[in-house]
Amino acid sequence: MKGKANLSQDSEVNHMMNEKLQEIKNRALEQIKDTDSLEKLSEVRVAFLGKKGELTDVLKSMKNVDPKDRPAVGQLVNETRKAIEDVLDEAKKNLSEKMREIQMKAEVIDVTLPAKKAVYGHPHPNTRALDEIKRIFIGMGYEVIEGPEVEYDYYNFEALNIPANHPAKDEQDTFYINDKIVLRTQTSGEQVHVMEKGKLPIRMISPGRVYRADEVDATHSPCFHQVEGMVVDENITFSDLKGTLAEFAKQLFGPETKVKFRPHHFPFTEPSAEMDVSCFKCGGKGCRMCKGEGWIEILGCGMVHPHVFEMSGIDPEKYTGFAFGIGLERIALLKYEIDDMRLLYENDDRFLKQF
Amino acid sequence: MNTSINWIKAMVPGLEGVTDQEFRDAMTLSGTKVEGFERYDKNLKNIVVGQVLSVERHPDADKLVVCQVNVGQAEPVQIVTGAPNIEVGSSGQKVPVVLDGGSVAGGHDGSPLPENGIKIKKGKLRGVESAGMMCAIEELGWPHDFFPDAAEDGIYILADDAVVGEDAVHYLGLDDTSFEYEITNNRVDCYSLIGIAREAAATFNKEFNPPKVEPTGNDEKVEDYISVDVEATDLCKRYTARVVKNIKLAPSPKWMRDRLRASGIRPINNIVDITNYVMEEYGQPMHAYDLDTIEGKKIVVRKASQGEKFTTLDGIERNLDSEVLLINDSKKAIGLAGIMGGENSMITDSVSTMLFESATFDGTNIRKASKRIGLRTDASGKFEKGLDPNNAIDALNRACQLVEELGAGQVVGGTIDVYPSPKQQERLPFEYDKINAMLGTDISREDCLDYFKRLEIGYDEASNELLIPSFRQDLHRTCDIAEEVARLYGYDNIPTTLPHSSSTAGGVSFEQRVIDKASDIALYSGFSEAMTYSFESPKVFDKLLIASDSPLRNTVRISNPLGEDFSVMRTVPVNGLLTSLATNYKRRNKNIKLFEIAKIYLPSQEADKLPDERKQFTLGFFGDGDFYTLKGVLEEILERLNLCDRPEYDPKSEVEFLHPGRRADLIYDGKKIGYLGEVHPDVADNYGLGEKTYIAVLDIPTLVAEANFDIKYTGIANFPAVSRDISLVVPNTVLAGDIEKVIENCGGKLLENFKLFDIYEGDQIEKGFKSMAYSITFRAKDRTLVDDDIKGIMDKLLGQLKDMGIELRA
């Protein structure tokens, strides 16, 4: 055996020592073999290798050894210690692995038990729909602005080409505060506010509450929301209006969405249109949602009427623009397939939780 | 507006072969929106004209008879019927017969029509074979009053001109479709058949054949019968009239009845039918007076006097005011202009001479008058749109033509026409380039001129001007012309592009960012977003225990609300949320947390100024949590908006609807930024809230003024902290906030944080006192603190607390 200590052959002591060490080693290995826990293994280590352990005792008895033999004996002791330690370490490693395995087996959980969730609130469906609309238009460079709900008659009507006695004023079932002040019936007055500020070009959307004297039912509410939109610059065309709103529809309802523009009339735009989108439920084949039409009316729009420009101090010979108005509730009801508008204002938790 | 497609096709023959669906789609895309259409014969199948050959008694039933009916086939069919007007022994009657396998619209009792009609099959009635059914008008889907010539009870006996074996549905004019349109208020001309037919002709590019009106009248002069004086020329732009004498009232001919019926109008007699027919055709209401009731051979058009009473032809006395326009003779009022004629001058069965009036009244005046009087008629509905004065005379002459054609009377020669300021021909420059520039198109000049021609817009090449026809009262500027071009070119054919203009940054306002952040925190704290109405009942203030003299009761009031419950704009933001919480409570929903971002509306001192609209951030909940839960959410919102100083809570809050011992104003930087508390038990009772409910409100403008998003990194502490725990015996009257102020003041720069970790009131503590334990942590940025650093601070701290009656707990 390489490096084995070279003891005097005839030394009785040495012989005895050798045998003793061998005996200790065998015993130690025997005990290690039988050990089935880390604690017991630790006890074995202490019993043989500890400060008061057997091998330490052997070292202590070195004083009886012939001094010339001491190095060799010492080496023999160390070899024995090393041998025991190696086996101990090996045993510890194996035992640890085994214990970890047992532990993990005992720790198996039912991963299908219910999750523990923090309780978060839910945004209102109107807000969810509005956030989508805002995201789309902000992406196209639109600023989001807001204006007053209690508004001068002038901004709600006159400045939008709806003079006193215009039948449209009656049609909109306006709530009046007094002769000059109304609850706005549309967000379109924001067009005028923005233009009056005189900062061009304009690209804005303006969401907000509007009011009409409609009795509450499944499709009407005296208080609801619109999102106004407006672009004013040089060389803005009707084709830009079509392109912008087609892009909006695709982003809101999906890339397959088709749009259709129908001529319509609004006093403050000319030409005017209503936009339909292909039904996003049936894809245009016709279903209950689109009442079998394949198309759903989404918004009104048009080129800003030159007289509206003139009243707001913008030169219609230089600038053109388009405007549109979206009914927010309409979008929310359609997009989330809500069948009764009253649900939006009841705030039943079982309803709100779904958004 | 409803029209019969057959009537339209009579004016636009080129539409023959166009299906209902095609008509609908094309008209909608060119601007005449079709709301819907319905075929009158959708459930009428296999119905022919039959002739009764014989009627015999049924062997086993008293009320039934057995008929042999010639339906134009080789053999007559046998039909058993119980109709009272087919009598035993009679024969020769022509009747609609539905044959075996056909179907009818409904039952003979006139009850609501089933969606898919009723199938008719060969069968036996009391043992006698019956191979079809003779039809009453109700079975064909119509009430009797639309077919006055039909029997009121029994089989519809057809006129002699019906041809045996031919399609009875066609004979009765029921092979027609009713179209319903949404006409926008700028297209007054389209509230008429001619208007829609003209649009149809332009849309399909087909020839348009409106009625040709030939001259009418005898040698007499209308002036010998009547003179007209229009005093209120501002309210009556044109007044035309003609006289018809020797009137012979009779039913109108079948073709006229068919068309009226298909337009939803009941035929009455020739004179009434002509008036209605022309109103449908031209969109011009007319009125007929019995000329013999008109005194002094004179018509005066003037305003009523205030408080004047007048009995309309429906027999109801109406109270008038000085803005109502009246038609008078030389002595009395005889009609409410444009709304309804008078009882005293109405046409009766004994009429012999009548005055046909076709006038143009001011639309706004008619609209307002009919609203004030509370009488809206078909006529006023047309007038209030503002009619074209040049249409009035055409309609009158058309009516007179029909009178002659129908032999309903003798038209007197000449026409009264009071038209003080005739409408001028409107001319617009044809700005071809501008139109294309506005549309983003490249439509040729020739195409534009073709569209104009189809729309009867004239073109003067010499001046390059468009001549706007009188009926197009909506065309005033080039943008209007652009729309005409666009809709005939087809909106769908206009390209789609994106604006190539100068770029804009876009984004949301600072206020919106603040609100979004606050919303995020509310959502992450378990609050869902609610929305409630902005207006409410003034009773809300009592419900919320708000003092009768509180300025909050000064509201923006709606002068025409839907009802008291929706009559005032809210000045307090909590009613909506409390109501919603109560709704959830009543529905047994548990642990409800809601928030709302909504405005309050504080009226201005000046009546003509707009109110101050202030957005409020309101949170409310019941269920898991308490006052301090809500406080935690508020503080999180403040921290995330970078309001880093410690907010103060003033328990001397005066928010009436909160529990007096459990409410506080939230003060930041000396400013009241909101309030919170437990809902007053009386208020909770008022709302039916059976659980403790908590409410907090933040005033968003104040919050926005303080908020910022400027975050600066301050480093991570490198030196260890030193903590001191102190346990205090505190008089009950001392607030935690007062103690914490002292800790903050004394702690100075070295104070890192502190925490109340125990509060106790009870046996071990003297009555009137509470035990409070704070853990206070100090740290320096530049060194490790030593005991001496802390000792001075703690001594000062305890000294100040002692002055407040607070002792260290032994």
Image (cartoon, coloured by chain):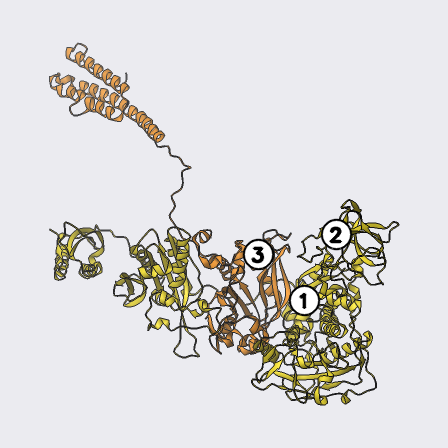
Seen from the viewer's position, the closer of residues B441 and B485 is: B485
Same chain for labels 2 and 1? Say yes or no.
yes
State the image coordinates of residue A243 (x, y, percent, origin top left).
Answer: 60, 62
Mark 1 crowdedness (10 Å alpha carbons): few <14, some 14-19, many ≥20 = many
> Which residue is located at x 33 percent, y 51 percent?
B624
Residue type at mark 3: give it. Lys
Identify residue for label 3: A250
> Which residue is located at x 51 percent, y 63 percent?
A216
Mark 3 crowdedness (10 Å alpha carbons): few <14, some 14-19, many ≥20 = some
Quadrant housing the N terminus of chain B: bottom right
- In the image, is A156 to the left or to the right of A13? right
Seen from the viewer's position, the closer of residues A286 and B288 is: B288
- State the yellow chain: B
Q: CA distance from mark 2 to mark 3?
A: 46 Å
> Which residue is located at x 15 percent, y 49 percent?
B763
Residue type at mark 1: give it. Thr
Local secondary structure at mark 3 = helix
Residue at mark 2: chain = B
Chain A color in figure: orange
Quarter holding residue A262 = bottom right
Residue at mark 3: chain = A
Local secondary structure at mark 2 = strand
Residue type at mark 2: give it. Ser
Between circles 2 and 3, the one closer to the viewer is 2
Quarter holding residue B216 = bottom right
Q: What numbered label is drawn on residue B32?
A: 1
Q: CA distance from mark 2 to mark 1?
A: 34 Å
Identify residue for label 2: B103
Q: CA distance from mark 1 to mark 3?
A: 27 Å
